[in-house]
Image: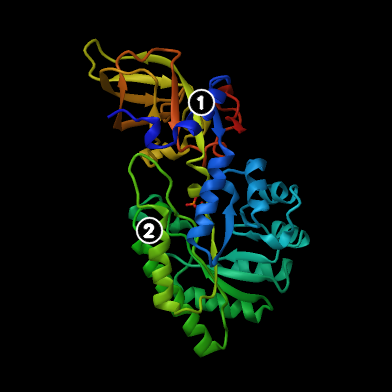
């Protein structure tokens, strides 16, 4: 079945995006600010008790950061470069958390000097750096969680620590003069199994209780991370369902008196708001009677589609031509054989698709511009417009 715009966008919105995109050279990403704002408003509606810390890495376009700022949101920042972008909008440091557990002491100091007092950590060495460079700061400890198998883009193995170590780190934080403020986790990006939040929240509850009972440390915050869904080819539950279930898990563990709850959404806010437009560069077959056409387009892994690695994220793809379709291999434009987007998962494209035709990749507003290489094979970074 060929993808249809109405499965992903209402008619006016798609017409608006397409009309703008069709005047641009390809490849380019067009992000619709209204769609982004709508996603944000629905997240805020679904989690009225939570504070939003937008994961800037998903899409740091100043127009999007400004929408978040106007809504009073906060920012989860991964580097001093992202911090500079956020501060440039006039956001104060107390609305930022340094969410990266891997950081240099000099960068911790940079954040602290700019007024940031909330830091993620998952190791003793990092905690000691924070205590030296940001004395008295609030820290939250990131724990490992299950869920890698059911997330399209898993995150947990590189970050986080076991619960026992989280206890030790909270105690160490207190002893170093920091404020052991809370516990965070990330169940994996584009997480399809809502139940993984249940076991993660239960772990957090256990840590809260142990620290209070045995060490007199009262944690104040739980950071539920990202992982909320975008609309790709394989559908997920609606955000409302995620919110209802996660709220139920929180109630089960914490009763009606929740601690401060933080969310760090990236993909779920930015992805659906973006349409990436590329052009067919070449269509070929590898043998005279080859069953599959190879469709080469001017967007590839290095131009912003890194998340097609292992075909993890399957973006909905629309072309205007209609008629009989055939399965294709889709590859990018560079001289690197890793630059094949989809070979196992076969997209169907019309037989009359021709070189020069445009391809509209839906739900591409997150993790595309930021992943785009600056000059691989000489190609410039992905152009992006907010409308
Ligand atoms: C620390 C942290 N928080 C939040 C996010 C955003 O997650 P998502 O895009 O799944 O919403 C990420 C993504 O990498 C992250 O590393």
* Quadrant including the N terminus: top left
Which image quadrant for residue 118?
bottom right
- The percent position of residue 52, horizontal first and vertical second, equals 57, 59
Element assignment for label 1? helix
Q: Is residue 162 visible?
A: yes
State the residue in front, 322 or 253.
322
Q: Which badge, 2 or 1, is on the more N-terminal residue?
A: 1
- The percent position of residue 49, horizontal first and vertical second, equals 53, 67
Q: How many marks?
A: 2
- The percent position of residue 197, horizontal first and vertical second, equals 40, 64
Residue 241 is labelled as: 2
- The residue that appears at 66% across and 41% down in the rendered structure is 63
- The percent position of residue 237, horizontal first and vertical second, equals 35, 52
State whether residue 117 is above or below residue 253.
above
Element assignment for label 2? helix
Marks 2 and 1 close (CB-CB < 8 Å):
no
State the residue in front, 50 or 345.
50
State whether residue 87 is above or below residue 164.
above
Residue labelled with disc 1: 18
* Quadrant including the C terminus: top right
| Left-right relation of 113 to 190 | right
| Outermost residue toward the top in this view | 288
Which image quadrant for residue 326?
top left
Q: Is residue 101 visible?
A: no
- The residue that appears at 39% across and 76% down in the rendered structure is 252
- Badge 1, how many Cα within 10 Å: few under 14, some, many 20+? some
- The residue that appears at 50% across and 33% down in the rendered structure is 13
CA gap, disc 2 and disc 1? 31 Å
């Amino acid at each position: 079945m060929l993808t249809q715009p109405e499965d992903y966008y209402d008619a006016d919105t798609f017409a608006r995006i397409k009309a703008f995109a069709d005047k641009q050279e390809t490849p380019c990403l067009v992000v619709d600010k209204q769609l982004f704002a709508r996603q944000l408003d629905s997240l805020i509606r679904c989690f009225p008790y939570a504070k939003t810390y937008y994961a800037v890495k998903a899409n740091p376009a100043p127009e999007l950061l400004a929408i978040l700022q106007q809504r009073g949101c906060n920012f989860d920042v991964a580097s001093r470069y992202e911090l500079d972008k956020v501060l440039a909008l006039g956001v104060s440091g107390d609305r930022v958390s340094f969410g990266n557990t891997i950081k240099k002491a000099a960068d911790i100091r940079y954040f602290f000097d700019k007024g940031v007092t909330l830091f993620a950590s998952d190791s003793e060495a990092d905690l000691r750096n924070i205590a030296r460079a940001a004395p008295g700061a609030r820290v939250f400890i990131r724990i490992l969680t299950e869920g890698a198998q059911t997330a399209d883009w898993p995150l947990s193995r590189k970050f986080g620590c076991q619960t026992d170590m989280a206890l030790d780190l909270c105690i160490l934080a207190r002893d170093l003069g920091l404020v052991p403020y809370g516990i965070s986790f990330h169940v994996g990006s584009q997480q399809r199994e809502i139940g993984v939040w249940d076991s993660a929240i239960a772990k957090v509850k256990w840590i809260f209780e142990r620290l209070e009972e045995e060490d007199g440390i009262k944690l104040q915050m739980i950071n539920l991370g990202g992982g909320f869904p975008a609309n790709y080819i394989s559908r997920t539950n609606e955000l409302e369902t995620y919110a209802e279930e996660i709220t139920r898990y929180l109630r089960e563990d914490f009763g009606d008196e929740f601690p401060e709850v933080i969310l760090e959404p990236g993909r779920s806010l930015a992805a659906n708001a973006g349409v990436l437009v590329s052009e067919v560069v070449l269509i070929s077959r590898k043998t005279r009677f080859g069953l599959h056409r190879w469709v080469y387009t001017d967007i590839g892994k290095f131009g912003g589609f890194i998340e097609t690695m292992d075909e993890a994220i399957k973006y909905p793809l629309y072309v205007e031509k209609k008629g009989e379709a055939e399965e294709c291999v889709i590859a990018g434009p560079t001289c690197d054989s890793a630059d094949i987007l989809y070979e196992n998962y076969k997209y169907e494209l019309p037989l009359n698709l021709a070189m020069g035709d445009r391809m509209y990749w839906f739900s591409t507003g997150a993790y595309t511009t930021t992943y785009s290489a600056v000059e691989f094979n000489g190609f410039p970074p992905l152009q992006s417009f907010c409308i």
